[in-house]
């Protein structure tokens, strides 16, 4: 009798673990969406900062990142290295929990590589170009979340049920 109760309890836990794994994958997709929403705000704030402030690019990016709740893009300004190197380091330090994939990070690095290297008008045009690219990434992540969230949860649940059936 106790053996059967333990077996059923184990099966229920396996089903819940499968469903939990699906929920975690869905959460990762929502973190990616949240990042691109915040990065959109970051680009708008940065654009304004560049237009109306005379500070260097390190300070502008740091201030804009704080305003968009992207503190991990801030860092101690190291004027001995070019901004592009500093930016790449910050992008590589973005936590995995943000849900960004390699192509997202490559686009972010590409964005920062030319930032601060032209005059104000050139920088504003650069930001406008990348705002369109990141808007496409935002739309992609919204679509991906809508399509895949139910699938991830269902696969996790049915995977757990399948294992539970095999055990029983």
Image: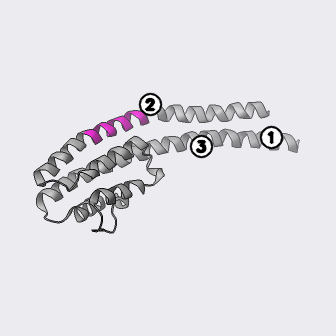
Per the rendered image, the range of residues in magenta is: 133-145
The residue indicated by pointer 1 is 7
Q: Nearer the viewer, residue 99 or 125?
A: 125
The residue indicated by pointer 2 is 147
Task: Give the residue drawn at x 52%, y 41%.
Answer: 25
How far across and how far down the image is residue 34, in percent? 37, 47
Using the rendered view, name the quadrant where residue 131 is placed.
top left
Mark 1 vs mark 2: which is more N-terminal?
Answer: 1
Left or right placement of residue 156 versus residue 85 in this view: right
Check contact, mark 2 vs mark 3: CB within 8 A: no
Left or right placement of residue 151 versus residue 66 in this view: right
Viewer can see residue 23? yes
Choose mark 1 or mark 2, whichever is in front: 2
The residue indicated by pointer 3 is 20
How far across and how far down the image is residue 113, in percent? 27, 51
Task: Give the residue drawn at x 48%, y 45%.
Answer: 27
């Amino acid at each position: 009798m106790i053996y059967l109760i333990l077996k059923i309890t184990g099966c229920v836990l396996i089903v819940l673990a499968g469903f939990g794994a699906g929920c975690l994958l869905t959460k990762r997709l929502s973190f990616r969406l949240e990042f691109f929403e915040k990065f959109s705000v970051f680009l708008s704030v940065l654009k304004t900062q560049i237009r109306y402030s005379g500070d260097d690019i390190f300070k502008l990016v740091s201030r804009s990142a704080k305003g968009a709740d992207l503190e991990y893009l801030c860092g101690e300004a190291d004027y001995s290295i070019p901004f592009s190197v500093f930016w790449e380091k910050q992008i590589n330090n973005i936590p995995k929990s943000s849900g960004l994939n390699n192509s997202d990070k490559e686009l972010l690095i590409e964005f920062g590589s030319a930032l601060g290297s032209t005059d104000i008008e050139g920088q504003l045009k650069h930001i406008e170009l990348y705002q369109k690219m990141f808007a496409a990434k935002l739309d992609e992540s919204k679509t991906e979340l809508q399509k895949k969230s139910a699938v991830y949860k269902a696969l996790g649940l049915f995977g757990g049920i399948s294992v539970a059936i095999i055990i029983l």
